Amino acid sequence: MVEVLVTNGPWLIGIAAVFGFLMAWGIGANDVANAMGTSVGANAVTIKQAIIIAMIFEFAGAYLAGGEVTSTIRNGIIDSNYFTDSPELLVYGMISSLLAAGIWLVAASALGWPVSTTHSIVGAIIGFAAVGVGYESVSWGKVVGIVGSWIITPAISGFIAFCIFQSVQRLIFNTDDPLRNAKKYVPFYMALAAFVMSLVTIIKGLKHVGLHLTTIEAYAVALLIAVVVGLCGKVLISRLKMSEKPERQANYNNVERVFGLLMIVTACCMAFAHGSNDVANAIGPLAAVVSVVSSGGEISSKASLVWWILPLGAFGIVCGLAIFGKRVMQTIGKNITHLTPSRGFAAELAAASTVVIASGTGLPISTTQTLVGAVLGVGMARGIAAINIGVVRNIVVSWVVTLPAGAGLSILFFFTIKGVFS
């Protein structure tokens, strides 16, 4: 059936490009909004400022560090050997998966649900492969790992956020002189944030650009950056103009200003790392289609990217965030629990720390679930009454629905596309 690919090649690539843009648009509307939601909810930045920051750093991450080569089949979720004799089925399936995941992400974003873009595309790939090709073509062990991550990931990030926020409370806020203690301890928090964010950027954000650092080298570079940032932070904090009012509330406000500055830096790092890593959810299947069609049906584990694929994904992410990102930002930043800069910082640092832990252990992870778990952890540190249980319930339901929703839509589109081109 290679003749089908040769005859309809330009059409298949064009359709895949459109659906790949839709998927990237959904990633921008949903996942990027997650990364910036805590900064907006804590009033460290406005929604307009968050969109501008994310547009710059997401585009930079996706375009500069998104990679020249990408996995043709995300997460190794299906066995490519089952498509050797019928490569056109892989092409139809990847196109179907992009459309299915893109539609689901747009719908979830419209409802303000923070869902996992990775799980959306994985669910879609599972659907077309299991029904359209064969049950045994799916690596079901990896699916079990993904389902397990729904519990493990939020639990880890929630625990870390709880511990970070409790330490901030005890060392700074619950003391006789919060501002003096903030000047004393915040440089250490800045150094810790710089260390974790540097690791996130090196491990997740720069792994595609040929920066092949060993684990020890990566930690050494991150430690050096942490020391520099901590020392610079100490100098900057000493120069900040603070309110001279003796009231305790004014003291608290001064401390939150310090954490507000810190949140802007962490948000930029997370946006860069996210753009470089998650753009693969959109361009991976698209690259697979282009690779298989261009090679006349040959399937490889990696696909070189043609020049237009990365900019397409980066531009799609930016458009989705700018047009539709506000709703998910509202859910993460304001609807789960009330955030201040110090609470938002604890959540962001916990999420980044969990990403580092997951990258080191190979744990399948969703940025969305990591951040939601971290925000919940901060809320729990203030007591269960501080959490909007109804919003949390809706979020958990949306996570569970994501895999079957992506799978169902993908199956429908797969047989439709197969019928049109076969």
Image (cartoon, rainbow, N blue to C red):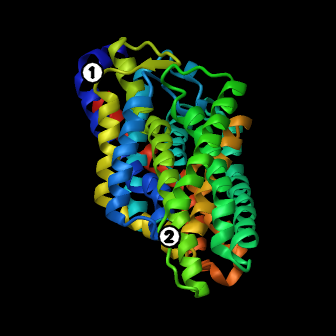
Which residue is rendered at x = 34% and y = 37% of the image? 313
Q: Please identify the quadrant where the C terminus is shown.
A: top left
Which element is circle 2 on?
Answer: loop
Badge 1 or badge 2: first in the primary sequence: 1
- Which residue has dot 2 on it? 42
Mark 2 crowd level (few <14, some 14–19, many ≥20, 10 Å Cα): many
Q: Position of residue 279 (x, y in %)?
A: 43, 38
Q: Is residue 300 above or below residue 309?
A: above
**Residue furthest bottom as drawn:** 247
Residue 9 disc label? 1
Residue 114 disc label? none
What amino acid type should be assigned to the residue bearing mark 1? Gly
Residue 373 in view (yes/no): no
Q: Position of residue 164 (x, y in %)?
A: 71, 62
Give the image quarter of residue 361. top right
Q: Nearer the viewer, residue 394 or 42?
A: 42
